[in-house]
Image (spheres, helix red, strand yellow):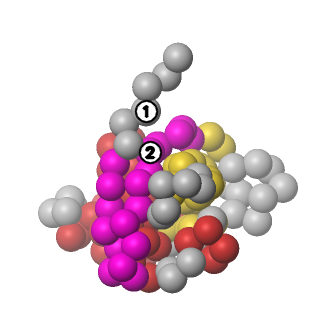
């Protein structure tokens, strides 16, 4: 049995989200975001309904960052940018269950998020 660590985030939309990381996998070949790594989170904004949110870290975005910085992103850095993108979704999307189930991390967002964290 897997024990999940439920975390809480208060979005700028006023919702208090509970979420936990489910796992990651390569995006399915037919997915519009492929090739990418899909990070899956289970989310609740009302403590009754739980739904999955996928955050896609596109391979071309990660490769662009790597080319600009002469190194590859570590797994921790990848997870950090994905989680920040999830938080931005909580802050910006009024109805996550209907409008925020699929989020994508762009190359510019990788740059911005890691710069915010002091990663070069």
Please tell me which residue is depicted at 84% across the width and 55% down the height of the picture. 30
From this view, report whether residue 57 is shown above or below residue 88: above
**In-front residue for pair 48/55:** 48
Residue 57 in sight? no
Secondary structure at badge 2 equals strand
**In-front residue for pair 105/59:** 105
Q: Residues within 10 Å of mark 1 (few under 14, many from 20)?
A: few
Name the outermost residue toward the top: 1
Quadrant (top left, top right, bottom left, bottom right) of the C terminus: bottom left
Q: CA distance from mark 1 to mark 2?
A: 7 Å
Q: Choose the circle earlier in sequence order: 1 or 2.
A: 1
Residue 7, how many percent across, how many down? 34, 48
79 with respect to 112 (left or right): right
Please tell me which residue is depicted at 32% across the width and 62% down the height of the picture. 9
Please tell me which residue is depicted at 48% across the width and 55% down the height of the picture. 47
Residue 29, how many percent across, how many down? 80, 50
Tell me which secondary structure the magenta stretch mostly adopts: strand
Q: Which residue is mark 2?
A: 20
* CB contact under 8 Å: marks 1 and 2: yes
Asked if residue 14 lies in the magenta stretch, the reply is yes
Q: Which residues are magenta?
A: 7-24
Q: Residues within 10 Å of mark 2 (few under 14, many from 20)?
A: some
Q: How many marks?
A: 2
Secondary structure at badge 1 equals loop
**In-front residue for pair 100/13:** 13
Asked if residue 39 lies in the magenta stretch, the reply is no
Residue 15 in sight? yes
Residue 4 numbered tag? 1
From this view, report whether residue 99 is shown above or below residue 31: below
Residue 104, how many percent across, how many down? 56, 68
Residue 17, how many percent across, how many down? 41, 62
9 with respect to 102 (left or right): left
């Amino acid at each position: 049995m897997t024990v999940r660590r439920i975390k809480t985030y208060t979005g700028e939309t006023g919702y208090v989200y509970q979420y936990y990381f489910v796992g990651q996998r390569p995006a399915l070949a037919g997915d519009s975001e492929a090739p990418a790594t899909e990070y899956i989170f289970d989310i609740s904004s009302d403590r009754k309904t739980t739904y999955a949110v996928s955050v896609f870290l596109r391979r071309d975005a990660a490769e662009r960052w790597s080319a600009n910085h002469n190194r590859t992103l570590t797994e921790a850095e990848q997870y950090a940018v994905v989680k920040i993108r999830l938080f931005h979704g909580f802050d910006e999307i009024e109805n996550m269950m209907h409008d925020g189930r699929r989020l994508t991390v762009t190359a510019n967002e990788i740059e911005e998020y890691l710069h915010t964290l002091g990663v070069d």
